[in-house]
Image (cartoon, rainbow, N blue to C red):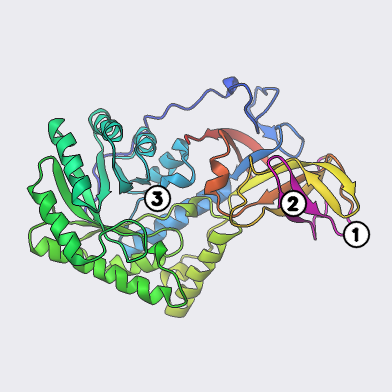
């Protein structure tokens, strides 16, 4: 497959740790000359969102090796973290580009050094188009967005032709009852013909999102859908409605990336791109369950995921204090909906500390969550006190990241050596 010949150079400027904005949570109070802060010794204000650097590196390398083996390009979805420094790490590890959902996210990907930016969504509205036009001019990126209607294609054509620019587009191919996308080949072919005749547009391939397909036989239906998408790309190419070399076919969220890679592999005339996003952070909830299914499928079919060795690791932790033990068997923790995701399961207690020493947390279980408080069940006989530190893992990291301006990066001794900033 053709590879981008530009080196990924980040234009992102690291923020100054000495000047955290007033009101920033989860950072140090007293600056230390060596720039290292112990979470266990209470040198960071809690609650704090913490990323384990060793897990990040593990996940980064695991997924890149997976993509390389299948000869598909990796364009991780940036919406999970919206953290420019993490985008840069993914690009430097070999990612082809960054996937985004909005024009503002595309701008963040560009300053992180992405030369290929895939917006797996429709570009609608003049101000949004203006942002992308500016992005293309200022950063010299290869930007791609989705279209699934002649109305949208006409709007894009009018704007970008007037700007003297050509916008790269992908036809989104969907399923009945799903999300966006043309519902059949006939709709897609009509749209492709419209794009070919329009000024300011260039059709580069087909985009799909298989994650809207559910049910007990989801894998079979997904495989058929992906094969149909490849067939559509080939038919549009044969009819010269797609005229670029190596048309793009792209799909894959974080649950079915293995199936997408398998189905797209073996088509060297196509530019196959997978877009998992949550692999870098992973979790102990819905994405852990999805990864277990990936490994199970690999074991059943002698897939490469088993040969890689190791697995994805949960990289995100939330550190918080016990605020109150108002009743036997009940504790209230200083962390709530403003700090941690709660849509896909409550946070899980993993570890605990008191006065710098580990404490037993067996049996502690979060039972409810409010804006600034989490309720934890404390088994009879468990010694839990006000001021103890509890360390939680989470499910669905996307909705934890967007609650933080800065996250701590820690080593395996729970010492913070740097911070990363988010751009939500």
Image coords of residue 57 (percent x, y): 51, 49
Q: Which residue is mark 2?
A: 351
Looking at the image, residue 150 lies above or below residue 264 = above
Quarter where residue 22 is shown = top right
What separation in Å lies between label 2 and label 1 (alpha carbons)?
Answer: 18 Å
- Report the span colored magenta: 356-382
Residue under numbered circle 3 = 76
Distance between the Cα atoms at labels 1 and 3? 45 Å
Residue at 35% x, 63% y is 69
Percent position of residue 27, x then y: 65, 30
Mark 1: few/some/many CA within 10 Å (<14, 14-19, 20+): few
User: Which mark sits nearer the N-terminus, 2 or 1?
Assistant: 2
Residue 380, labelled with which disc? 1
Q: Residue furthest bottom?
A: 300
**Going from the N terminus, do you reach mark 1 or mark 3 first?**
3
Q: Quadrant of residue 388?
A: top right
Q: Residues within 10 Å of mark 3 (few under 14, many from 20)?
A: many
Q: Residue at x 57, y 48 (%)?
A: 54
Does the residue at mark 2 contact the one at mark 1 (Cβ under 8 Å)?
no
Residue 171 seen: yes
- Residue at point 66%, 45% (across, down): 318
């Amino acid at each position: 497959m053709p590879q981008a010949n530009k080196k990924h150079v980040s234009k992102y400027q690291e923020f100054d740790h000495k000047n955290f904005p007033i009101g920033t949570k989860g950072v140090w109070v007293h600056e230390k000359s060596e720039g290292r802060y112990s979470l266990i010794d209470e040198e960071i204000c809690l609650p704090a969102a913490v990323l384990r650097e060793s897990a990040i590196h593990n996940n980064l390398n695991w997924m890149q090796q997976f993509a390389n083996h299948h000869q598909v390009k990796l364009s991780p979805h940036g919406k999970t973290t919206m953290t420019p420094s993490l985008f840069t790490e993914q690009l430097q590890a070999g990612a082809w580009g960054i996937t985004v959902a909005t024009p503002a996210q595309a701008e963040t990907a560009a300053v992180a050094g992405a030369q290929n930016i895939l917006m797996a969504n429709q570009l609608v509205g003049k101000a949004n188009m203006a942002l992308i036009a500016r992005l293309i001019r200022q950063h010299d990126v290869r930007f791609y967005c989705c279209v699934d209607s002649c109305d949208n294609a006409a709007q894009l054509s009018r704007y970008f032709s007037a700007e003297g620019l050509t916008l790269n587009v992908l036809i989104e191919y969907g399923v009945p009852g799903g999300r966006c996308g043309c519902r059949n080949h006939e709709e897609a072919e009509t749209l492709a013909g419209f794009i070919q005749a329009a000024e300011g547009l260039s059709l580069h391939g087909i985009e799909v999102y298989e994650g809207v397909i559910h049910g007990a036989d989801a894998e079979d239906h997904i495989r058929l859908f992906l094969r149909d998408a490849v067939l559509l790309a080939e038919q549009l190419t044969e009819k010269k409605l797609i005229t670029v070399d190596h048309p793009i076919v792209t799909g894959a969220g974080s649950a079915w990336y293995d199936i997408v890679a398998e189905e797209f592999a073996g088509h060297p005339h196509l530019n196959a791109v997978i877009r998992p996003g949550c692999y870098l952070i992973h979790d102990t909830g819905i994405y852990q369950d999805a990864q277990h299914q990936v490994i199970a499928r690999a074991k059943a079919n002698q897939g490469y995921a088993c040969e890689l060795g190791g697995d994805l690791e949960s990289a995100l932790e939330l550190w918080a204090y016990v605020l109150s033990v108002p009743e036997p068997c009940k504790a209230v923790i200083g962390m709530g909906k403003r700090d941690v995701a709660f849509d896909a399961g409550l946070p899980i207690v993993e570890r605990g500390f008191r006065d710098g020493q580990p404490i037993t947390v067996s049996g502690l279980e979060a039972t409810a969550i409010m804006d600034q408080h989490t309720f934890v069940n404390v088994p009879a006989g468990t010694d839990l006190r006000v001021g103890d530190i509890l360390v939680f893992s989470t499910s669905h990291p996307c909705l934890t990241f967007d609650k933080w301006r800065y996250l701590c990066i820690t080593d395996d001794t729970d010492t913070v050596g740097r911070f990363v900033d988010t751009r939500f």
